[in-house]
Amino acid sequence: MTESREVVESSLSGTARDVVQARDVRGGIHYHHAPANVTTRLPVPYQLPMPSRGFVNRSAEREALDRLLDDGSAGVRVLLVTGTAGVGKTSLALHWAHAVREHFPDGQLYADLHGYGPQAPVPYERVLEGFLRALGAPADTVHTVGEHMAAAFRSCLAGRRLLVVLDNAASASQVRPLLPATPDCLAVVTSRRRLPGLAIREGARRLQLGVLDQEDSVALLRSVTSGYRDDDDTAHMAELATLCACLPLALRVAAERAAGRPLMHLVDLLDELRDESGRWEVLSAEDDEDSEAVRPVFAWSYRDVPPAAARLFRLLGLHPGPDFSDTAAAALAAVDVRTARRLLDVLIAAHMVEQTASDRFSLHDLLCAYAADQARLEQTAQERQDALRRVLTWYLHAADAVQASVAPQEPGWNWCPPMKGCPRRRGLQGPRRSPRRGQRPSAPRRRRTRRRRRGRLFGARRAGVAIATGIRSEAAEGYWLLALGDAQRATGRPAEALASYERAAALQERLGDRARPAAAWDGQGRTHLQLGRVQEAVDCHRRSVDAHRELGQSWGTAGALLHLADALDRAGAAQEATGAREDAAELLASFTDPRAARLREGIAARR
């Protein structure tokens, strides 16, 4: 028996609104259509990560972001939050983004671009894939070339109000395809770089984030350790903040370590942070997460800068003071000032150096410690010694230039020639404004001017002593100790002045310099007279007069005689005092400068 089979063919010709293909159909077929005015609800993404706990203050920065949000300017709105590694850019962006979510009812998108970290920066195409899926874009738009996905992304955002947070960006080119093209959306970008391209082309508004102040740093420490160790001394907390350079990441890591050891004395943690060999271990998370450790976070920025800028950064860790000029940086690196400025610009753009004034720069303490560590690892001992000697020598010559500008009658020195690679010191400008012809400054203004001048002298001379000690030049140290003693005496520090004069005289005598001890004895005599020790003053001045006469120094002898006369007057030896002044007048007759003329006039007035 043969079974017959019916061949069924299905085909469609022309157009049809509704088509059904089926083998058997029983009963009627009914088509149901949604009303024309009903639209499909688009997905609303909520991708913002949870903000960190213990967020403190940043009120000024949040207010600045609020003002930018309220700015009704047309065009794409992009807010750029920049700052050094570990300063809290992500924390601020997320806290603020959560606070303003109601302004963006169509959702919030978030992406970590991994601009700095153990992973490679995320290609913008991969980010667009995730964004398009989150926005419910058609499947055929997701796996196309980057430019097409970027266009589809902008189309999806048209007519919607979304917040886009792009965290840890490496470059403007990584960010640009991810920016919305409608003024109803806002993009917040965080980066360690300044990303000037976003400001130039997209009109991004930049907010630069700095470290916390001392009060907010302690508040952050308290917030993290709250409930674990509430009885820690405030002074110890303040010192902990200082050792962490008030850097939020370092503060959080140190606070978590303290909170995890509630029975440990806080002073033990402070001791560990003071110890250079254990500092980075203390500032590392215990779960081996590099992104939560201070040193690796610095290293990611350091590896990203060009070799010449990295070398300057390392050498800046050797700088002996809290801030420096571009000329001092040039001395450290043995480059010209123009090159130093260009390299500093690179480091500033990477937020590895902060510019604090038109010609002043600084590194916070932890960055400085990291730079010094890298210098020890990558520079030889001789290279480090040469760099330090160059900058100290430059400072010594700069201090001498200040001395010559403020007190030109004082003798200079030439026993420490500039090292090879030291830039020439800049000329010192005089006062910017001077009284008009016939107009004399008021007495209070003259007093303020004298105080400022004495303050500058004191600072310059104290720096001279420190630098001379650093380069191990006893001749320089003796010179600047003598100058420092004069400044200490003039600013009401007689005990310190006597100590400086004594050290200066001892050093110079040991070196065989007979002129400087004579000046030191004269300074001691004037200081003793300030303290009412009349006989000690007379003895010191006699010794100074004898030494100057032996050296044949007319100017020094005249000055010592006048100071001796003042002491003799206080001792009641008026006749001898008059004789000393007359001898001084005779010596001063050979000098024609204005100061000698004033001294002669003073002697004549007392006859």
Image (spheres, helix red, strand yellow):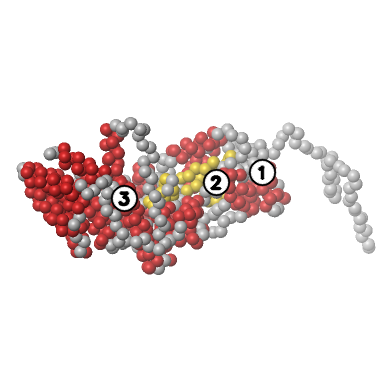
Q: Along the polypeptide, which appears first: circle 3 or circle 1?
A: 1
Residue drawn at (27%, 49%), measured in percent from left and top?
A: 409
Quadrant occupied by the C terminus = top left
- Residue at which label 3 appears: 404
Between residue 541 and residue 215, name the one nearer to us.
541
Name the residue: 43% across, 44% down. 55
Amino acid type shown at disc 2:
Val
Residue contact at pointers 3 and 1, CB within 8 angstroms: no
Q: Secondary structure at mark 3?
A: helix
User: Going from the N terminus, do you reach mark 2 or mark 1 first?
Assistant: 1
Disc 3: CA contacts within 10 A as few (<14), some (14-19) or many (>=20)? some
Which element type, helix, strand or loop, lies under badge 1?
Answer: helix
Amino acid carrying mark 3 in the image: Ala
Question: What residue sits right under mark 2 in the picture?
Answer: 189
The label nearer to you, 3 versus 2, is 3
User: Can you identify the residue that label 1 sits on?
Assistant: 154
Q: Residues within 10 Å of mark 2 (few under 14, many from 20)?
A: many
- Image check: 25 left or right of 282? right
| Foreground disc of the pair 3, 1 | 3
Relative to the observer, which residue lies in front, 3 or 354? 354
Picture quadrant where residue 179 is located: top right
Residue neighbourhood size for the residue with mark 1, other residues' Cα within 10 Å, grouped as few (<14), some (14–19), many (≥20): some
Q: Are circles 3 and 2 on residues that touch, CB within 8 Å? A: no
Residue 600 screen position, x and y as percent:
19, 43
The span from disc 2 to disc 1 (Cα, nearest Å) is 17 Å
Residue in view at x 9 percent, y 52 percent? 539
Q: Is residue 172 left or right of residue 255?
A: right
Kindly state the secondary structure of the residue where label 2 is placed: strand
Q: Is residue 523 visible?
A: no
At 63% from the left and 48% from the top, the residue drawn is 177
